[in-house]
Amino acid sequence: MVETTIRAGVIGRPIAHSRSPLIHRTWLDAYRIDGRYDAHDISPADLPAFFAAMRRGEMAGCNVTIPHKETVAGLLDRLTETAATIGAVNTVWREGERLIGDNTDAYGFAANLDEYAPGWDRRAERAVVLGAGGAALAIVHALIGRGFGAIDIANRTPERAAMLADRFGKPCRAVALDDPDLYRNADLLVNTTSLTMGETDGDRQWPGLEQLADDAAVTDIVYTPLKTSLLSAAERHGFRTVDGLGMLLHQAVPGFERWFGVRPAVTQVLRAKIVADLDSHG
Ligand code: NAP
């Protein structure tokens, strides 16, 4: 009997915490697609065999998470320009026997702001990015794509901010975290550090936030908790705030469309389902 079920999944180690199965299974149910999406705990040594099976047609593709995002590139046949620029892959699909790697985090980041802070990139004069890790790479790429004139990157380890700024060149610049003018007149503030992850009291102070441009948007890509201390502080100052969950949901859209042939919608029902899961498992 010919197998008709389309298979996809996510690879990583550890993988139990991944919300990707819940997101994709919710869409598979909603669109009544004969498909499966499974979590695979895969070690670096197992990657070649995994992708060989995908090349043979056993799977339509997969998401890639820690610790494989940077290393899988060498096992694929082509990277999209976005994945090559960011230097990390989070989505793989098959074209014939060829495997293509993409990075959809930049797309997910921008789509989340488009949804919850429409017009966030209208003025696009200055953005401040806190952090210089893997996620910051994707976000800087997205901000360049939306035409920001100045992108200032501040990081606890200043050398990493300098490396990130050098990598992209103009309009990026490394700035000091304790610069008293860090936030002055910025149209967008993005936290990409894990500083706010796991916060329980949410009363961390963010001095200088009031210097942001009047109609600035503030977003934190951390989504546990949903309302981080940065978002609480920004809300108190009257700025528009966007939490990080939408980025996670939107980055999943292009992969699902590639594998299962339907462009899925990021709905409030999906969001509520993931929020409930975060509430019950943390
Ligand atoms: P990463 O590569 O490990 O980078 C971590 C960043 O956080 C670095 O800039 C690091 O600074 C900074 N940092 C860590 N602890 C800090 C502290 N106590 N004080 C100040 N800075 C600190 O991690 P990543 O992949 O970029 O991910 C960062 C966060 O974004 C994680 O919480 C992750 O869950 C979240 N994320 C969310 C999404 C989404 O879809 N919403 C997607 C990707 C990531 P140093 O360079 O000084 O160490």
Image (cartoon, rainbow, N blue to C red):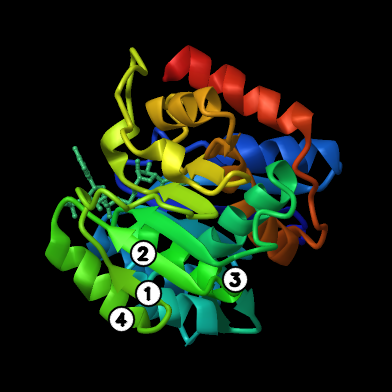
Q: Nearer the viewer, mark 2 or mark 4?
A: 2
Q: Which residue is mark 2?
A: 152
- Circle 1 packing at 10 Å, graded few (<14), some (14-19), many (20+), is many
Residue type, mark 4 in image: Arg
Residue at image coords 43%, 82%: 84
Instruction: Of the two numbered discs 3 and 4 on the same chain, state the one appearing first in sequence.
Output: 3
Q: Which residue is mark 3?
A: 93
Q: Which residue is mark 4?
A: 167
Q: Which mark is residue 172?
A: 1
Q: Are marks 2 and 1 in contact (CB under 8 Å)?
A: yes
Residue at image coords 49%, 64%: 126
The kind of secondary structure element at disc 3 is strand
- Circle 4 packing at 10 Å, graded few (<14), some (14-19), many (20+), is few
Q: Tell me how far mark 2 sits from mark 1, CA to CA.
A: 6 Å
Instruction: Of the two numbered discs 2 and 4 on the same chain, state the one appearing first in sequence.
Output: 2
Residue type, mark 3 in image: Trp
Residue type, mark 2 in image: Asp
Q: Nearer the viewer, mark 1 or mark 3?
A: 1
Q: Tell me how far mark 1 sits from mark 4, CA to CA.
A: 9 Å
